[in-house]
Amino acid sequence: MEVLKQRMYGLVPYNISSIQKGIQFGHAVVDYSLTQNHDDISSIYNQWAHYDKTFIILNGGTTNTQTNRYGTLNKHLETLFEMGITISAFYEPDLGDQLTAVVFLVDERVWDREKYPEYDELIHEPVDEPNYYFNLFGDDTDKILGMRRFLSQFKLA
């Protein structure tokens, strides 16, 4: 089985300083590492931690845990959970226990558009779009395309 490259993506609030964005992201990555099986050297997390090590920090918008004024970062956390993505969230005690980072691993099938191009980028492909993606991603097609759509709404923090 091919080993896929991984990147650790994270969402942080827009209204904290650049250094705080990195720090909050780091807190969540540490928490993510604590939830993974370190005994299995072939785990996705261990592969990322030993070989890939790339961080992508994105602007996740606002944070607010009040249910009548839920922040966009909080909504994105729910979306990732509903998508079945393994995540870690960090709530900063010094900011009233607000959600300040959500992190998750994303494999190369989502972000490497050269190796895994979009259907409409192909010039001569004799197969329809659903079959093209199924041939490319197999049973992971819905998850990969869902994550591509999800990540397309964000900019770097």
Image (cartoon, rainbow, N blue to C red):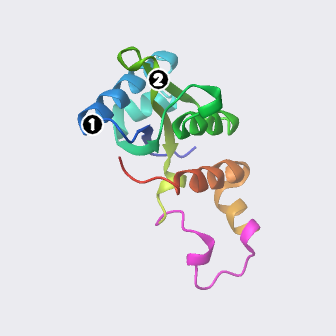
Q: Which type of secondary structure does the marked residue at label 1 adopt?
A: loop
Residue lying farthest front?
Answer: 68
- Secondary structure found at label 2: strand
The residue at the point 44 percent across, 38 percent down is: 10
Q: Which mark is residue 17?
A: 1
Using the image as rendered, state which of residue 144 and residue 48 is in the foreground. Answer: 144
Q: Which residues are magenta?
A: 114-130
Q: In the picture, which quadrant includes the N terminus?
A: top right
Find residue 30 and report its image quarter: top left
User: In the rendered image, which residue does mark 2 sit on?
Assistant: 98
Q: Amino acid at mark 1?
A: Ser
Judged by its main secondary structure, the magenta piece is: loop
- Residue 154 highlighted magenta (yes or no): no
Q: Earlier in the sequence, mark 2 or mark 1?
A: 1
**Residue depicted at x 58% and y 51%:** 150
Residue ID at (52%, 57%): 152
Which residue shows up at 65% across the image and 30% down it?
68
User: In this rendering, is residue 122 above or below 104?
Assistant: below
Q: Is residue 7 above or below residue 102?
A: below
Query: Residue 139: image x %, image y %?
Result: 73, 49
Separation of residues labelled 2 and 1 (CA atoms): 15 Å
Near mark 1 (Cα within 10 A), the count class, few <14, some 14-19 or many ≥20, is: few
| Whether residue 102 is visible | yes
